[in-house]
Image (spheres, coloured by chain):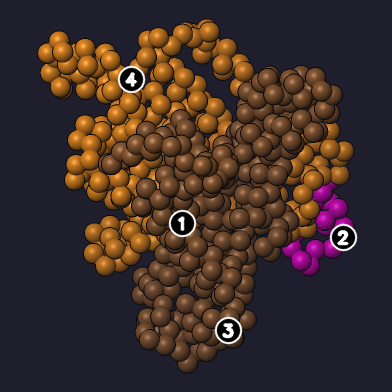
Amino acid sequence: MLLFILRRLILIVPILIGLTLLLFVVARLLPGDPVGLAAGPNASAETIAQLRQEFGFDQPLPIQYWTYLTGLLQGDWGTSVFTRRPVFEDILTFLPATLELVFAALLIAIVVGIPLGLLTAVYRNGVLDYVTRTLALGGIAMPRFFLGLLLQLAFAAWLGWLPLSGRYPFIEIPPETVTGFYTIDSLIAGDFYAFRVALAHLALPAFAMALSPLATIMRMMRASTIEVLQQDYVMTERALGLSNRLILFKYVLKNAMTSTLTVIGLYVSWLLGGTVLVETVFDWPGLGLYATQAILTQDFMPVIGVTLVIAIIYLITMLVVDVLYGVFNPKVRYE
Amino acid sequence: MTVQHPITIPTRSQSARMENWSRAFYRFRQSWLSVIGLAIVLVLIVLAILAPYIVPYPEHVEGATNTAARFLPPSAEAWFGTNELGQDIFSLVLVGSQVSLFSGLAVVFIAIVVGTTVGAIAGYFGGWIDEVLMRLTDLLLTIPSLILAMTVAAALGTGVFNMIVAISITWWPAYARLVRGEVIGKKEEQFVVAARALGAGWLRILCRHILPNIVSPIVVKASLDMGFAILTVASLGFVGIGVKPPTPEWGTLLSGARSYMPDYWWTAVAPGMAIFLAVFAFNLLGDGLRDILDPKARR
C-alpha cells in the first residue's frame, strides 16, 4: 500500500514535466504579445526590447524552458510580466480562498448527495424519488454563474440574509492566517463572530458550485445502490433476517460507494477549473480571478502556474480516490 | 398486453436495419423526458434559424440604442424588458441563440472529427504511435478545460470562430480516448481479420469496417456533450473572453447584466434562463439517446 502510494507519487513527476513542456510550447505558439501589453500602448521599441530581455523572452525557447524548469524546482515559478510579482507567492495567497470554496462545495455535495441517493434508491418511485430526480435534472443543467446570480438576488438583495459578495468585509480584519481558510482560522482563534461572518460569505458561492456535483453524486449513488440492492448477497442477508438498516449501512453503502467515488474525484478538477465562474459572480479573491486577470493580459507565467497547481491537486485527488477504493472494497489490490 | 398468435408468418415489409431504427424510435418515445428534450431542442433550433426574420427589433441587434427606454421591466412591447441601452432583451436573446447553439454544435463536431481521427489511428496502429498520441491526450485531459479554452481564446482574439477553435482544442481528447478504446476492441474481431485477409488497406478497414460499428458510443457522448458545449460557450462569454458585443451571445448578455443586478434583475434572467433551457433540453435528449443506443445503460 505504502509502496503503491510512493510509486504513484513518483509517477506524477514525469506528468508534470510533460505538462510544463506542453503549456510552454502552447503559450509560445499562441499569437499575442504579453510584453507589449504590459508595457502599454505608448512604450517605445527600446523599452519593449529591454523588457523582453529582462524576462528572458529574447532567449531561444529551449533555454527559456530549461530556465523555467530548473526555477520551478527551487520554488521560483516565474514572474508576472504585468504585476512583476513572483507567481509562486501570488498562488500561495490566492489558493486557500479557492480551496476553501471548493472543499465547502464538495462537502455540501457529498453530505447531501449521498444520503439522498441512498434514500431515493431505497424508496424508489416514491414521491421523494420523483421530486429529487426532477430537481437533479434541473440542477445539472443549471449554469453555476446564473445560479450564483439568482442566489445573490434572492438571499442577498431581496431577503438580505447573507452578504452579496466578497470573502470578508473590507473594513474588518480577517482572522489570523494559519491555514488560510477563514472558517478554520477563526475557529482556531476562538473567534465565533469571525466564524459566522466567514461562513455567511462562503454559503452562497459554495452552494452555487455545489448544486451540479450534488445532483450528479445523488444520481450516481441512486443508480449504484439500486444495482447493489439487486445482488444475490443482499437477498441472502434479507433471508438471514438482518435488519434493513444493517444491510444498507454495513453492506450496500460500501459497495455502492466505489462508482460514486470516481465521480467525486472527477468533480474536484471540475470544481477547481470552474471556480473562475463563481469567483467572478461573487468577487471571491481566489485563483480563478487571478487566472482570469492573467489570461486577459496574456501573462502566461501565472496561467502556467495556476494550471500546474490545479493539475497537481487533480493528480493527488485521483491517488486519494484510488486509495479509498481499497477502503470501501477490500477486494481491490494495490499493485 | 395482448399477445397475438399469427398462424402464418407475416411478410416482412422492412429491412432489418429499418426495423432496428423503428424499434429504437419506439423505445425513445417511451421515455417522455427525452421526448420533451427533443421537442425543446427542435423549437430552439427552429427559433435560432428563423431568428433574423422574426426578431421584433432587428435594429437593436445591430447595435442601435434607445436611451429613452432604458431598463423597462418586461411588458407587452418588450417581453423580457430592456437593458441599459434601451435595447429589447427578447430580440437580443433570440438572435443570441444562433451564436450559442451553433457554436456548441460546431465545437462538438470538430471535437468528433479530430478526436476520432487521433483515437482511431492510435488504437489501430498501437505501438509508439499509440504511446505518443495517448500521452499527449492524457496531458491535455489533466489541464482544466475552461482555463485552457480561456487562454487560447484570449490569445487568438475575440470572435465566434476563434472561440470555437479554442473550446474544440480542449474537447477532442475525450473523444480520442473513447474511440481508441472502441477501435482496440473491434480490431481483433472476425470481420476485421477477414477484411484484412482479403487485402483491404488500413484506411479502408478503419473507415468501412471499424468506424461504422462504433458510431453509437460516439453519438451518445456527443449528445450528452452538446449541453455542456453550449454551457462552455456561455461561460467564456460570461468571464469576458469570447464573443464581444454588439454580437449578442447569451453568456455575454448575462455578464453585461451583472452590473445592473439586483435592481434590474430581468436583464439577467432572460439570457440565463435561455442557457439553462438549452442545456437542460440537450441533457434530456442525450440521456434518452444513451438509453436506446447504449445497451449497458438500459435497465
Estimate the x, y position of residue B73 in percent, counting from the top left. Answer: 37, 82
From the viewer's perspective, tell me whether residue B67 is left or right of residue B205: left
Q: What stretch is highlighted in magenta?
A: A39-55
- The residue beneath circle 4 is A255
The amino acid at mark 1 is Leu
**Residue B240 figure quarter:** bottom right
Q: Name the residue under label 3.
A: B58
| The colour assigned to chain B within the rendered structure | brown
Q: Distance between the residues labelled 2 and 3?
A: 45 Å
Q: Where is residue A66 in the image (x, y as percent from the top left)?
A: 79, 30
Q: Upstream in the sequence, badge 1 or badge 3?
A: 1
Q: Do the residues labelled 4 and 2 touch (CB within 8 Å)?
A: no
Quadrant of the image occupied by residue B261: bottom left
Q: Residue at x 54, y 51 (%)?
A: B226
Say which residue label 2 marks: A45
The reply to whether residue A232 is in sight is yes
Compute the Cα span from label 3 to label 4.
58 Å
Chain shown in orange: A
